[in-house]
């Protein structure tokens, strides 16, 4: 489009001073125009003229050094509009108020009408000098800075009331607008074709791919280094620097070295060239912060989003989007987004440690820039692309989907037949082996929960015509140089080292599944005895590596954190109860001080201090004195953490009191609902009596680690202590030192789902955690 559109493009240049043609072309092949300083830029809006320079007839300006376009009409000066100085108060009061809702954002496509030209396709962009994309003139009209499509790369400010949303040429003609005249039609057609090609792109893609790159004067400015950019950038106060957790990752191109920080709540940073700016503005707000329309990180919609409550976080979400992804670790009130928790640790804890654990929130996290996923450095999903020290692109954002391979047996029962194949990994299931199957593409539980293989994992890999082969996922730093130079997707692909042959190759999530204890591999697919010997060696190495890995993880892991308390703590409407009915005074003597023959002990009452005739010699005050056995937490095989005795226990010995928060039925139901939403399978609820339940999850003592067994060595007993009902664990048989302590959860511990039992007892019922119907 020629210079007559009110743009800020410069004039022609000589062949000697013009940059090379390749450097002087924009992404669509247009010639780039040099930008000028703000003092030299003349923008005619139809309302006022800057710097007192006379406007031209068609709403454009020409500098003294510029050459008019051959298609432009001859400029005709017209008088500037007079500004009324003494407007009556009534007229001022009736002046129309501007609609301050910013309708368009950077990257939106528009039709813009300028002068004697038809509506011309353009894209909203930042002013290269001022660093803004919209402004209000005379308190009434909102203008947008746009860059025009076409042969010539021009930009400028729109005129009030003369823009339309670009929805394609057909829609434009339906509205009855005219096309360009014959002599302007070729360049207009090129502009329409370019805008039509940009229409399917997202706003972020348009900003990244189509934003003009500007240079000063007749010679292109040399590319500055990151250090020079940092030196030229305005100083950022320490408080603002701390509130920018995204580091130097550009919010448009997702590359490092971004120096321009948004002063809004998003805390994003940008490259100047990605925004089409030539210098750092004194204060910069991105288009989302300036309009208040912050997109949801999950669905990208900008309506009714909520910001994460942490000050240093600039992420926004819809509560409904987070609720749909209930496996993500997030907190509802106040809103703490999933990018402050390790997803891998959360998924592990939901099936092993219980969701009351808080270790998943600790430690330095590496965050994905496109989705609400964060990992510890040791938990990063294989196939992730590192963008910086604290940012990645997780493998879910692979640009090209690779072909997968499913197994020919059911992951649940291990037999073949008619199988339902997962779209994300090699898993396959019989439909009868699944609880329910939703419509649409089938995803297994791991894929639905975004569970990914991690570095150092032992996996089965399918490569070409070979059988499923055991391998180890390589750490990026351990990949040989020749393998790293091979073509692969990033993000998406990761390197594996095959056991037996110790060869390397690139693969992806669709062709691997985790190695488990007892795996022997499928039938051979040919290759002779030599290949069979290599496979047997690989299988042996894989078993050794898997056992060593499990042992190392077991030793490195720690029990889940909880707050240690000594007595039950009432929560909410639950209060401590004290009965006026004191226990009877026993008639014990010094030969048997409240031991086996004490009337209170037989009635499961504890003697009250100060009333028992035995005084300090009383042996029936074990709850009050916390006379617990010597216990320690241990790691069990396949059942998480457990509790063992460090001394020999005789039958009937008081082991420990079950301590936690005292809650009522309503609070219990609320907590159960929350735990199920977080896919937690470990519960610590124990019913004391009607409307009084102990929850040892967030607060408790070592008794919370005691596992279930269908053939236990301990049992629960309710005792009456100082007017309050309390629960203790007692040995029901002689127990040797170092033995794991267990009790039967049946009708004691609460849970709204039947959970499979792994106690291994001969009389195992198969399930635990059944919700009790009656009180204990």
Image (cartoon, helix red, strand yellow):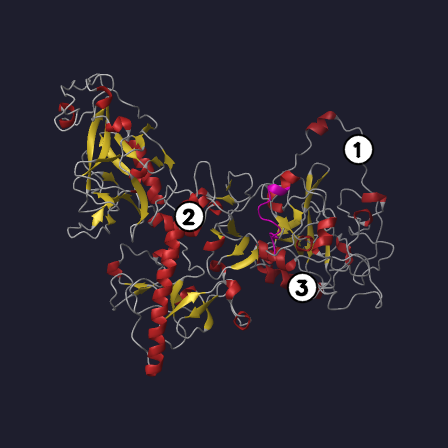
Regarding residue 757, the answer to whether it shows in the image is yes
| Helix, strand or loop for disc 2 | loop
User: In the rendered structure, which disc, 3 or 1, sits on the residue that comes first in sequence?
Assistant: 3
Q: Which residues are magenta?
A: 241-253
Q: Position of residue 587 (x, y in %)?
A: 13, 19
Query: Where does label 3 land, which residue?
Result: 27
Camera-near label (2 vs 3) is 2
Helix, strand or loop status at disc 1: loop
Q: Which residue is mark 1?
A: 84
- Give the percent coordinates (x, y) of residue 433: 25, 59
Residue closer to the observer: 431 or 669: 669
| C-alpha gap between disc 2 and disc 1 | 61 Å
Q: Earlier in the sequence, mark 2 or mark 1?
A: 1
Q: Nearer the viewer, mark 3 or mark 1?
A: 3
Residue that sits furthest to the bottom in the current view: 528
Q: Does the stretch in magenta take in 76?
A: no
Q: Which residue is mark 2?
A: 328
Rendered image: mark on residue 388: none
């Amino acid at each position: 489009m020629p210079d007559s559109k009110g743009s800020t493009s410069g004039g022609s240049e000589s062949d000697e001073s013009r940059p090379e043609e390749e450097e002087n072309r924009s992404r669509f092949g247009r010639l780039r125009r040099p930008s000028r300083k703000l003092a030299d830029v003349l923008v005619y809006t139809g309302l006022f003229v800057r710097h007192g320079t006379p406007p031209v007839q068609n709403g454009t300006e020409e500098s003294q050094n510029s050459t008019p376009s051959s298609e432009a009409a001859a400029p005709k000066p017209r008088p500037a509009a007079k500004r009324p100085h003494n407007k009556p108060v009534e007229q001022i009061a009736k002046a129309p108020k501007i609609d301050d809702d910013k309708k368009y954002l950077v990257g939106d496509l528009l039709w813009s009408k300028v002068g004697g030209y038809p509506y011309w396709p353009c894209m909203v962009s930042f002013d290269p000098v001022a660093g803004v994309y919209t402004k209000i003139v005379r308190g009434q009209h909102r203008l947008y800075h746009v860059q025009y499509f076409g042969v010539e790369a021009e930009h400028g400010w729109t005129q009030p009331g003369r823009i339309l949303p670009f929805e394609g040429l057909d829609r434009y003609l339906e509205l009855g607008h005219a096309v360009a005249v014959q002599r302007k039609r070729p360049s207009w057609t090129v502009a329409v074709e370019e805008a039509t090609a940009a229409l399917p792109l997202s706003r972020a893609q348009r900003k990244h791919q189509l934003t003009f790159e500007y240079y000063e004067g007749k010679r292109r400015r040399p590319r500055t280094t990151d250090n020079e950019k940092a030196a030229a950038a305005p100083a950022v106060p320490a408080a603002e620097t701390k509130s920018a957790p995204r580091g130097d990752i550009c919010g448009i191109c997702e590359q490092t070295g971004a120096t321009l920080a948004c002063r809004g709540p998003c805390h994003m940073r940008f490259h100047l060239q990605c925004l089409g700016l030539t210098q750092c503005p004194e204060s910069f707000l991105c288009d989302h912060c300036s309009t208040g329309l912050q997109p949801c990180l999950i669905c990208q919609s900008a309506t009714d989003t909520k910001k994460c409550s942490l000050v240093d976080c600039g992420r926004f979400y819809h509560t409904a989007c987070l609720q749909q992804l209930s496996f993500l670790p997030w907190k509802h009130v106040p809103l703490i987004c999933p990018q402050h928790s390790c997803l891998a640790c959360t998924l592990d804890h939901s099936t092993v440690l219980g969701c009351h654990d808080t270790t998943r929130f600790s430690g330095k996290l590496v965050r994905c820039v496109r989705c609400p996923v964060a990992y510890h450095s040791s938990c990063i999903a294989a196939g992730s692309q590192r963008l910086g020290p604290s940012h990645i692109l997780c493998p879910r954002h692979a640009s090209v989907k690779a072909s997968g391979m499913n197994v020919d047996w059911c992951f649940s029962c291990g037999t073949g037949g008619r199988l339902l194949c997962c779209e994300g990994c090699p898993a396959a299931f019989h439909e009868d082996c699944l609880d329910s199957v939703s419509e649409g593409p089938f995803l297994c539980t791991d894929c639905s929960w975004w569970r990914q293989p991690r570095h150092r994992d032992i996996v089965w890999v399918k490569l070409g015509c070979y059988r499923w082969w055991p391998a180890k996922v390589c750490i990026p730093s351990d990949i040989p140089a020749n393998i790293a130079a091979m073509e692969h997707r990033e993000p998406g692909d990761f390197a594996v080292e095959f056991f037996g042959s110790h060869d390397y190759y690139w693969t992806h999530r669709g062709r691997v599944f985790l190695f488990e204890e007892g795996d022997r591999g499928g039938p051979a697919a040919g290759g002779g005895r030599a290949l069979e010997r290599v496979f047997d060696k690989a299988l042996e190495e894989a078993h050794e590596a898997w056992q060593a890995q499990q042992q190392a993880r077991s030793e490195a892991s720690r029990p889940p954190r909880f707050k240690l308390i000594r007595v039950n703590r009432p929560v909410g409407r639950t209060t401590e109860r004290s009965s006026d009915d004191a226990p009877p005074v026993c008639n014990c003597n010094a030969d048997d001080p409240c031991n086996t023959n004490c009337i209170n002990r037989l009635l499961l009452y504890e003697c009250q201090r100060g009333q028992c005739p035995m005084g300090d010699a009383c042996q029936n005050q074990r709850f009050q004195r916390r006379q617990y056995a010597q216990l320690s937490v241990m790691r069990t095989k396949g059942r998480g953490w457990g509790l063992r005795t460090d001394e020999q226990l005789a039958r009937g010995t008081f082991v420990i009191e079950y301590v936690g928060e005292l809650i009522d039925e309503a609070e219990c139901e609320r907590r159960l609902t929350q735990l199920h939403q977080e896919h937690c399978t470990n519960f610590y609820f124990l019913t004391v009596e009607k409307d009084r339940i102990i929850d040892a999850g967030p607060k408790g003592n070592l008794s919370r680690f005691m596992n279930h067994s269908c053939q236990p060595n301990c049992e629960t007993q309710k005792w009456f202590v100082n007017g309050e009902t309390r629960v203790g664990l007692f040995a029901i048989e002689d127990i040797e030192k170092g033995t794991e302590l267990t009790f039967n959860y049946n009708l004691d511990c609460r849970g709204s789902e039947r959970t499979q039992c792994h106690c291994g007892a001969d009389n195992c019922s198969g399930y635990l955690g059944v919700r009790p119907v009656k009180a204990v």
